[in-house]
Amino acid sequence: MTRLKTEDICHIKASLEKYNRDLIAKTGATLGQIAAYAAETREEKVCRNFKVAVIPLTCGRGIIEGFTQTVASITGFLGFNSFVTKNTDAGGVAEAVEKGAEILMMADDDKFVAINRVTGRVSDNGEATGRGYAAALDLMTGGLRNRNVLILGAGPVGKGAALALARLGAKISVYDVEPGCSNRLAEEVREKTGITVRIEEKLDRALLVNKIIYDATPTPSFIHKKHITPDTFIAAPGIPLGVDGEALPEVAGRLLHDPLEIGVATMIYDVCRQA
Ligand code: 2YG
């Protein structure tokens, strides 16, 4: 999973209203409705009484300036009472509990999690992002049942996507630069859902044949104008964007891409939905 940079996220807080209107235009649903769909619940069944604490973690490569504030702005936008702890690490966890936060959110270099202290529910950003984008793609395309979807990238997000897309009834192909990763993803999807995933070995052919593309790779600018038709839809949770500058105007109205919003929204709905 790519490490975010401050410049990837510093615009988010000020543009959440516009981002939400853009989501409605593309999918017919708000950020909250997409997250509710992904968390298999409904907006009205999500308990907003929970207080959310976002805790900065200094381990590994350390703090990303603006990261915890941006996460808190997204959960705040969705109606949750949210704050960033003044303390970091263990002190931040203690402060969160002392201030009565039921939901703790924190990220080190490998994992970004949401924890509901009361119910014990945990949500992982990679899996939640995969599922959140699958839900948004289902809404944007008018329904993925029996539709071919090409997943690019068989990592945590691609796997979360594959499991969610299988549950939505899509016919899934997967391409990864490491064929072994594609095989492992296909194996796990078959074990968990019984669905067979097609393995694509030629990227260019796969991009020319498939109209619904799920880009879960950390690779920039490999989807070109020749791969885009008026029927092309792209879900691209990965940073940087796989669609190159020439292709972008051709698909902009049918492209879902954000550095944090859909993943964070799905995480908080995962851990706050009522049973
Ligand atoms: O607390 C902090 O500021 C830092 N410890 C946060 C570090 C986050 C590192 N992880 C990433 O940048 C991404 N994996 C986050 C999720 C990306 C969403 N697709």
Image: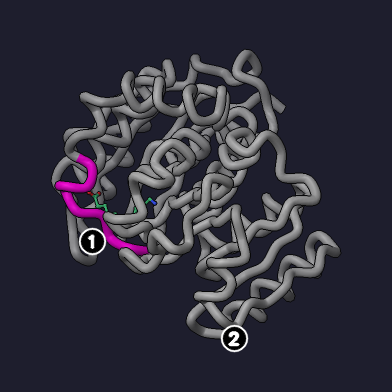
Q: Is residue 74 left or right of residue 117?
A: left
Give the residue drawn at x 32%, y 63%.
Answer: 2
Q: Position of residue 22 (x, y in %)?
A: 40, 26
The residue singled out by tag 1 in the image is 59
Residue at the extreme right:
194
The x, y position of residue 63, in whole percent, is: 18, 52
Some atom of ligand 1 lies within 8 Å of the CB belonging to the residue at label 1: yes
Please tell me which residue is depicted at 18% across the width and 58% down the height of the picture.
62
Mark 2 surroundings: few (<14), some (14-19) or many (≥20) residues within 10 A: few
Residue 97 vs 234, above or below: the answer is above
Number of marks drawn: 2
Q: To which quarter of the image does residue 218 belong?
A: bottom left
The amino acid type of the residue labelled 2 equals Gly
Q: Which residue is painted at 57% across and 75% down in the image? A: 205
Q: How many angstroms separate mark 1 from mark 2 (CA)?
A: 31 Å
Quarter of the image with the C terminus is top right
Give the mark nearest the N terminus, 1 or 2.
1
**Residue 83 numbered tag:** none
The stretch drawn in magenta includes residue 112: no
Q: Position of residue 217 (x, y in %)?
A: 43, 65
Q: Please report contact status of discs 1 and 2: CB closer than 8 Å, yes or no.
A: no
Identify which amino acid the numbered label 1 is placed on. Answer: Cys
Whether the magenta-drawn stretch holds residue 8 is answered as yes
Query: Which structural element holds mark 2?
Result: helix
* 244 in relation to 122, above or below: below
* Dot 1 crowding, Cα within 10 Å, few <14, some 14–19, many 20+: few
Q: Relative to residue 270, is residue 64 drawn left or right?
A: left
Compare residues 73 and 90 and report the one nearer the observer: 73
Residue 59 makes an appearance in the image = yes
What are the residue bounds of the magenta stretch? Answer: 1-9
Asked whether residue 105 is in view, the answer is: no
